[in-house]
Amino acid sequence: MNTDILEPQAVCSPITSSAIFIVATLNAGPEAAQTVKDWCGDVAGLVRSVGKRVPTGNLTCICGFSSNAWDRLFGHPRPASLHDFREFGEEGRHAPATPGDLLLHIRADQMDLCFELATQIMAVLGNAVTVVDEVQGFRYFDMRSIIGFVDGTENPVGHKAVNFTIVGDEDPEFSGGSYVLVQKYLHNMTAWNGLSVEAQERVIGRTKLSDIELDDAVKPSNSHSALTTITNAAGEEVKILRDNMPFGRPGAGEFGTFFIGYARSPEPMEQMLENMFVGKPPGNYDKLLDFSTAVTGSLYFVPSADLLEALADR
């Protein structure tokens, strides 16, 4: 891989306890486009300025651009695999595509750092964008999702994380970049909590307390873990780097998961969604979707940190 030439954004940074996810659309007019392009050269400085206040806070910001935004802002050349979010499923079990030109994944070990950086970024972007979704995520107990199971157990680490997430020589002009897919899921907690622990474990494919994967002899083929394990044509497992976060408003009865997955190509993430929403084979869909509804979906390219800064002058 050629990643020693271009520095990636903080895709493979350690998981933090807090995050803010902002999805925005690009407003009309050349002034809006120029504002966003200028901001590309400034965002690293904003992260440094805010993060300097708490050096141990692990503040980072990852910026991604949709296919439409890339064409409008930067034109050619463009990332080889960048395209619109692909929808999957059918009515009642559907992964929808929703508007989004710009993704900001802001994370730190303190929410005040995330909040301050988001405030500073939005002040710079101003009327150039319209925020269509904003989620404040938190880490739930011992790395668990809002439904009570440990999340991200199979994440790649170290060099494997880089190999699975960072574009290399397959698209040399965009080496050091990554692709990121985001979805917001809402959970029917009344129905979910109505299941026994054993029934929940069969839906997920792991034990709830100890987070041990069920033996293949007893793990259902339509369990979440079975259908989200992706292999390539050679039978080798292809990993996705997830940094999902719970979110919610208990007073409004809202309990959700913000799914965010990074990979060096959209293909494994799209295969995962096809397995979940269509089924493998078709009809053998992810039983977790009986309790969880996807309400948003969008796909972005994350340029390397070096390219992000250079895009200001493109």
Image: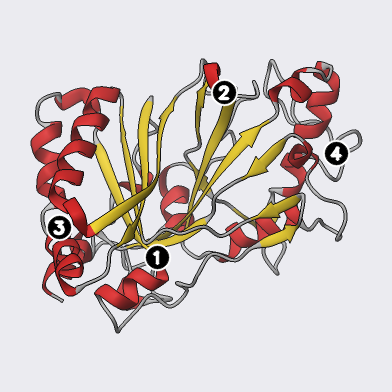
Q: Pointer 2: what residue? A: 144
Q: Residues within 10 Å of mark 3 (few under 14, many from 20)?
A: some
**Is residue 181 positioned above or below 184 on the image?**
below
Tag 3 near tag 2, CB within 8 Å: no
Left or right of 123? Residue 293 is right
Alpha carbon separation for disc pair 3 and 2:
35 Å
In terms of image quadrants, where is residue 91? bottom right
Q: Residue at x 67, y 42 (%)?
A: 293
**Is residue 11 positioned above or below 28 on the image?**
above
Task: Tell me where residue 222 appears, x and y as whole percent.
Answer: 83, 44
For marks 3 and 2, the one nearer the N-term is 3
At mark 3, the secondary structure is: helix
In terms of image quadrants, where is residue 175? bottom left
Q: Pointer 1: what residue? A: 66
Q: Pointer 4: what residue? A: 216
Alpha carbon separation for disc pair 4 and 1:
38 Å
Query: Hey, what amino acid is under mark 4?
Result: Asp
Tag 4 near tag 1, CB within 8 Å: no
At mark 1, the secondary structure is: loop
In this rendering, the label closer to the viewer, 3 or 4: 3
For marks 2 and 4, the one nearer the N-term is 2
Alpha carbon separation for disc pair 3 and 4:
50 Å
In this rendering, the label closer to the viewer, 2 or 4: 2
In terms of image quadrants, where is residue 31? bottom left
Alpha carbon separation for disc pair 1 and 3:
16 Å
Q: Pointer 3: what residue? A: 39
Q: Residues within 10 Å of mark 2 (few under 14, many from 20)?
A: some
Q: Residue at x 45, y 48 (%)?
A: 161
At mark 4, the secondary structure is: loop
For marks 1 and 3, the one nearer the N-term is 3
